[in-house]
Amino acid sequence: MFNHTSRRKSDAGKIVSKKNKSTPVAVMDPDEGVQLHGSGREGANEPAPGRVESFHGAAEEFEETANGGEWDSRLTGAKAREKVLSDSESRLRKQSAALADLTHARAHYRGDLRAVLRGITEAAARALEVERASVWLFNQDASQVRCFELYERRLDFHSEGVELTVRNYPAYFQALERDFIIAAHHARTDPRTREFTDDYLGPLGITSMLDAPIRLGEKLVGVVCHEHIGPPRRWTSDEQNFAGSIADLTSLALEDMELKRTEAALRESETRFSSFMNNTSALAWMKDGGFRYVYVNQPFERFFGCSPQDIAGKDDFELFSMETARELRANDEKVLNTDETLQTFERVPSPDGQPHSWLVFKFPFRDATRKRFVGGIAIDITERCRAEEALRGLSRRIVAAQEAERHRVARELHDSVNQMLASARFRVQSIRGKISNDNEQLADEAAKASELLEHALQEVRRISRNLRPSELDDLGLPAAARSLCEEFQKRTGITCDLNFGRLPKRVPADVELTFYRIIQEALTNVEKHARASRLALDMAREGSSLRLLVQDDGCGLEDAKPPKKKSGFGLVNMRERAAFLGGTLEVISSPGQGTEIVVKVPLGRSFNAEPART
């Protein structure tokens, strides 16, 4: 097809290229890969006319040509047929030799598309005895076709780079989609190729064209062109079949290139994956459907002191203790059974027996054959857990110190201030009794003083009870909670329904204090924010845990108005107190439906359930 600025081969076989000075083009480097895409037009999937199965039918076509009078009139009869057969055999030998050489060259230059296509165009031009042979490939959206390789036989030149826009030559590209071969004996009049006459065929003296579409599967990706200069030429069946074989070889070369690119991309991807996996601080692994290790990264190897050969094909029961292996297997089975990613914590010791805590992500996946695998990534959070435990220990010590101080102040108030106030009230009442009836004013003042002292006594007792209720130490949690709720109901007018189920004979002191403080905080929240009229408190043993439920019929947390002044962390404090004892606190609330606070704290097996004291 179109003329190209040429490139001459050096004596070392290298090609020196030059751009076409008249037409600026974007050169496609074959070493960087070729985008292979079909034209996408209607008819692309229509079956192409079948290829001639053998070259032996060529003799009959040549006999028809000879009988048609296109050969020298002196060659008639048997001589003409002998000449036709001789020429056909000569062509077949030349074509067969060319295809054999190209097959060998393809094996030698596999993946080097430029070298293979140079050999293809040269061999095709010489075997068909045409002036020009070229390979054209579509761009990504099949809107253009670009000359990837052109060989001009008379000058022994190679060139590339010219581009054609598909919409400018609709008949030709429709024929490529439809036909197996475009054998244009008279290219300037053939309806499939005459679009090129004015700007290409005529100026270059091209009279005949033999073009074979290049397909990858059912997709049209390009075309191999053979162009004859001189008197019009009739393309024989063997020549058309040879052109089709050249297109097939070109297709194989493109597949080789794609395979080479895919292999290179795969190697690059594997290198990136390996680099990423081996330079992360996280441990990573893959297990097959039988939970046997098929891959571990280098951090995994370093931590456990093993090599890939030591661990490949083994499961957790062969590598870890029974307890550890059971924990890992249970999580792996959960991932495969649910087919969902799992985030969890696992305890896997180091080889020297030191305990380690891991934040683990496990996920299911399948390979290309649909086999199931479990992947995992683990981050060592041992130091973080130790720091959190130390922080929790510090918080517990702070809370314990606060409670001790509250206890001390409560006793001081009860044993000292309360007694002094009681004594002062007694003395005032005594003085009041000695005041004569004629001194009413002084009697009134004494009565008021006595009343104030009574209020002071009640306030000191309330403060003392809030700091550390004596009932909690003397009678236990149920009695202290009942006293607290009775005082709450009297103060707020909110009805309190209490229910104490079967409880241990005596709950541990830290559990009693934690529950009492949570109840105390919950009642404060109800009083300040809930706008409730009724409250229920339920406490009972549930398995090996003590369960507390505080429920109100108020406005719910989302509609509750915030306090005018910030009074503390509220729910956060309650949740932390429960967590100190290894328990949980759950808040259930919705607008207009009230709020439930559910607390569960483990008790231990040494406590026997008995009816609670009332």
Image (spheres, helix red, strand yellow):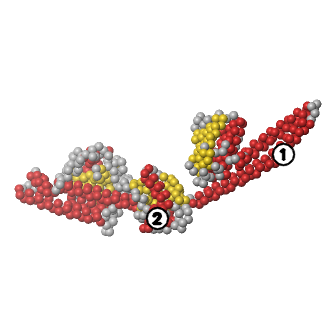
Q: Nearer the viewer, residue 584 or 99?
A: 584
Residue positioned most to the front: 610
Describe residue 163's horizontal placement relative to residue 592 as left or right: left
The label on residue 319 is 2
Q: Check disc 2: other Cα within 10 Å, few if <14, some if 14-19, many if 20+.
A: some
Residue 134 x, y percent position in the rendering: 28, 56
Disc 1: which residue: 420
- The answer to which quarter of the image holds residue 357 is bottom right
Q: Nearer the viewer, residue 466 or 480?
A: 480
In what element is the residue under mark 2?
loop
Residue 597 seen in the current view: no
- Give the spatial CA distance, label 2 vs label 1: 72 Å
- On screen, 425 above or below 12? above
The C terminus sits in image quarter: top right
Amino acid type at circle 2 is: Leu
Q: Residue at x 44, y 59 (%)?
A: 286
- Which numbered mark, 2 or 1, is in the foreground of this view? 1
Looking at marks 2 and 1 on the same chain, the residue that comes earlier in the sequence is marked by 2
Q: Check disc 1: other Cα within 10 Å, few if <14, some if 14-19, many if 20+.
A: some
